[in-house]
Structure formats: structure tokens, C-alpha cells
Amino acid sequence: MIVNFKPKRYFSRTPNHINRFRPRRASARAMAAASMFLLVLASAATVAALASAAGGDNDKETHIKLYWHDVASGASPTVVEVARAAVTNTSKSFFGAVMVIDDPLTEGPDLNSSSSSSSSGLLGRAQGTYISAGKDELSLLMNMNFVFQAGKYNGSSVAIMGRNAVFDAVREMAVVGGTGVFRMARGYAQARTHTFDLKTGDATVEYNLFIRQ
């Protein structure tokens, strides 16, 4: 007797538990929605960038010109040395010396005519430190606050930090912040030596501050 036997195809159809793990093709509507979302997101980022750039054009700019007086001589110096390294004594650039300052700031270059009263040009004080940081040349690291004690900026301050190669004609340092009317300040300061007495070490320096807020 001949029996026709046909083997069963147990997997002729994919079981449901396998189909669940097969990725489904995204519909055209879903793909269009995703594309629209990305387009809107990119447009929003572009608008934000343009608004930020436009806002920068509206920054307030302030220019202040004043004179900084570093007085090392006399009975009441405004700069004192507080530390030095072992090599400072033999260094031609005074490398390693640390100075603390409380220097007068005036409208004009003559300190003597500005010290008698606030109306004659005394604007405030430069308070902070400078360090002789150049090993082969006289170069200072300045870290100071210009504290205004008279005029329209009275009660405010500007923070200045940077390298000061004192024998360069023009030195540029960074304005890194401020207080009062100069909150969130940024910009730069340019220093030009007005007078320097080699015998006493006294110096008068013209500072121009360019501040943006």
C-alpha cells in the first residue's frame, strides 16, 4: 500500500511572536511630520541666532580716559612690595616681585593738583596687585580694580587683568567685569606711560577704557 505523505510546513507562516520584532515601515504621513518638525526646529534656531546677533549691536559702549599714579617715593607711597623670590635681587627684570597698590586715579596727568579736593579731578583708586612676571624683560601681570569714588560713575568699579610690558608704547589689557553701572562689563584697556621717574620709581600712566555692556 502506498501512502502519500506530505510533511507539514510548520513555518510556512511567520509566527506572531516573531512578527512583533520586525521593524515596520514608517508611513508617508509620519515621515512628512518628522521632516516638518526638523524644519521648524532649524528655523527656530536660526531666528534665535539672528536675534542674539542683533542684540549685540545694541550693547552700550563707554569710553573712559583717566590717569593712574603709582607713587613709590615719599612718606606715603601708594605701592608697596609684599613679596619677592630668591632670584629677584639679581634679576634685571625684578622677576618674582609682588606689589600691592592703592593708586590714585585722576582726570588729568597732574596728581598734585588733584589731591586737594574731589572737584579738582580725583576720580577714585586703582586697588589690586601687580607681579613682575617677565624673566628676561620687565613685564607685569596686572590684577586690579578701578574703584570710582567721584563723578557720574561714583560707587562703581571696573576689573582689569592682563600683561603689561611697561616699555611698550601701548599696552592692552582685558576688562573682565565690573560692579554698579558696570555690571557684566567686558572690553579692553589701553595703557600709555605719561611720565616715569627712574630715580624714585614714580609713574603716571594714561589709561583708556573701552567698555561694552
Image: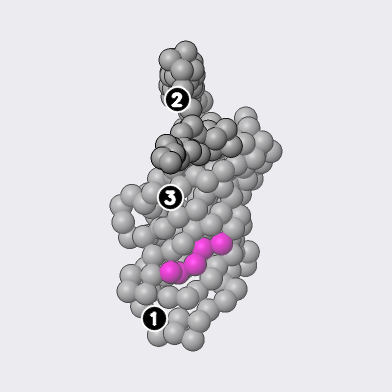
Q: What is the CA distance from the residue labelled 3 to the residue labelled 1?
A: 25 Å
**131 and 101: which is toward the camera:** 131
Q: What is the CA distance from the residue labelled 2 to the residue labelled 3?
A: 61 Å
Q: Can residue 109 be seen in this view?
A: no
Q: What is the CA distance from the residue labelled 1 to the residue labelled 2?
A: 77 Å
Split into 4 quadrants, where in the image is the N terminus?
A: top left
- Determine the secondary structure under disc 3: strand
At label 2, counting other C-alpha atoms closer than 10 Å, the crowd grade (few under 14, some 14-19, many 20 or more) is few
Which residue does the image show at 40% across and 85% down from the upper left?
90
Location of mark 2 (residue): 25
Location of mark 3 (residue): 173
Residue sitting at the far right: 155
Please check the rendered image and state whether residue 59 is part of the magenta-colored stretch, yes or no: no
Q: Where is residue 198 in the image (x, y as percent from the top left)?
A: 39, 67
Q: Answer yes or no: do the residues labelled 2 and 3 have beta carbons within 8 Å? A: no
Q: Position of residue 84 (x, y in %)?
A: 53, 79
Q: What residue type is labelled 3?
A: Met
Mark found first going from the N terminus, 2 or 3? 2
Which residue does the image show at 63% across and 32% down from the upper left?
181
Q: What main secondary structure does the magenta stretch of the protein show?
A: strand
Location of mark 1 (residue): 91
79 relative to 194, above or below: below
Q: What's the magenta region? A: 129-133
